[in-house]
Image (cartoon, rainbow, N blue to C red):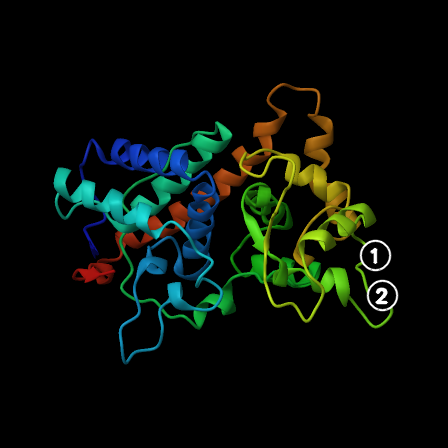
């Protein structure tokens, strides 16, 4: 698949083609929605929304982002982007960037599994550089403390409120037990189990995740009540100390201040959508930042393959 096209373009059918491809993929496998939204975040948080997460490693060179241990084998949905790109090449040859396809696809996933639609500016340029070591240097890890998370997001110019908003993508998808099992079996020298986790929830997780030394690494939903629906149940779980990852055991004062929107809007019919409209506005913020590259002539580069 060839990427690296011009940033500004005209292809009237581009978004319709991507949306149709995404809807077909989610109908066949609802879990692919979480995979594509996560892929877009992993792309944007490293070098901006430039599609660099799609680049394949070249033998003899350092591994690319997609092959770093953070992304491989957990990132899913590459085949959906490739199918959309193939269809777009037939409709508008050498026109639509892979970065735009991924941004459209993430938006279309939110529409399909959450009923949320939003505008996505087009015109991103595909990046030509993809360095695997930059992934753990930039992406927030599942075991970061609240203070470390705040620092990580602040480096990207994002506030605590925006950080928690973006975490709402964990309303869908799954996590391997190895990403959080320390909270169940070896939390600290003084407490085997993380005391901030709801005991009944921890007991349920222990029935699904074996104690160390584990010979298997099962997956469990990040949000068990509506695991394939993008809604605000994830936040309700956090308020009730039912967050799965260490990074979700956020200080109580952060929870209280940031989640006040949910408690004050719980009686309104649209309360499920409010938080995610804000989440997706942050995703669009990344997109606008990436589009600034359009005004830098030095960034007009030749094509590359993924």
Does the CB distance between marks 1 and 2 fall below 8 Å? yes
Foreground of the two, 147 or 57: 57
- The residue shown at (64%, 58%) is 150
Residue 269, horizontal then vertical, whole percent: 62, 18
Say above or below: 68 vs 303: below
User: For the image shown, how many numbered marks are present on the structure?
Assistant: 2
Report whether residue 108 is seen: no
Residue 271, horizontal then vertical, whole percent: 63, 26
Residue 202, horizontal then vertical, whole percent: 76, 52
Residue 168 appears in which quarter of the rendering?
top right
- The residue shown at (66%, 60%) is 180
Q: Is residue 38 left or right of residue 98?
A: right
Q: CA distance from mark 1 to mark 2?
A: 7 Å
Q: Is residue 17 left or right of residue 162?
A: left
Q: Which residue is mark 2?
A: 191
Report whether residue 219 is seen: yes
Mark 2 crowd level (few <14, some 14–19, many ≥20, 10 Å Cα): few
Foreground of the two, 111 or 214: 214
- Disc sitting over residue 150 in the figure: none
Q: Which residue is mark 1?
A: 195
Element assignment for label 2: loop
Residue at the limit of the structure toward the front, as seen here = 215
Say above or below: 57 vs 78: below
- The residue shown at (42%, 46%) is 36
Residue 145 appears in which quarter of the rendering?
bottom right
Residue 203, horizontal then vertical, whole percent: 78, 51
Say above or below: 286 vs 139: above
Element assignment for label 1: loop
- The residue shown at (38%, 49%) is 77
């Amino acid at each position: 698949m060839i990427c690296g096209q011009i940033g500004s373009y005209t292809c009237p059918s581009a978004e319709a083609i991507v949306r149709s491809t995404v809807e077909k993929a989610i109908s066949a496998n609802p879990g692919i929605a979480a995979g594509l939204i996560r892929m877009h975040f992993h792309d944007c948080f490293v070098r901006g929304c430039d599609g660099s997460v799609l680049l394949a490693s070249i033998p003899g060179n350092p591994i690319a982002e997609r092959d770093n241990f953070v992304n491989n084998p957990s990132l899913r949905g590459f085949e959906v982007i490739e199918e959309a790109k193939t269809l777009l090449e037939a409709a508008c040859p050498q026109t639509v960037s892979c970065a735009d396809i991924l941004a459209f696809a993430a938006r279309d996933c939110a529409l399909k599994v959450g009923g949320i639609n939003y505008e996505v500016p087009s015109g991103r340029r595909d990046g030509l550089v993809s360095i695997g070591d930059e992934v753990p240097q930039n992406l927030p890890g599942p075991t970061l403390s609240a203070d470390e998370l705040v620092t990580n997001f602040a480096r990207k110019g994002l506030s605590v409120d925006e950080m928690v908003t973006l975490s709402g993508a964990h309303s869908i998808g799954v996590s391997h037990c190895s990403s959080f099992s320390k909270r169940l079996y070896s939390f600290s020298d003084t407490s085997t189990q993380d005391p901030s986790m709801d005991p009944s929830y921890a007991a349920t997780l222990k029935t699904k995740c074996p104690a160390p030394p584990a010979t298997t690494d099962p997956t469990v939903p990040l949000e068990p009540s509506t695991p394939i629906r993008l809604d605000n149940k994830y936040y309700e779980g956090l308020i009730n100390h039912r967050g799965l990852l260490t990074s979700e055991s956020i200080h109580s004062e952060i929870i209280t201040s940031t989640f006040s929107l949910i408690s004050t809007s719980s009686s309104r019919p649209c309360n499920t959508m409010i938080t995610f409209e804000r989440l997706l506005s942050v995703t669009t913020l990344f997109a606008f930042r990436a589009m600034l590259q359009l005004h830098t002539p030095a960034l007009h580069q030749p094509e590359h393959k993924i």
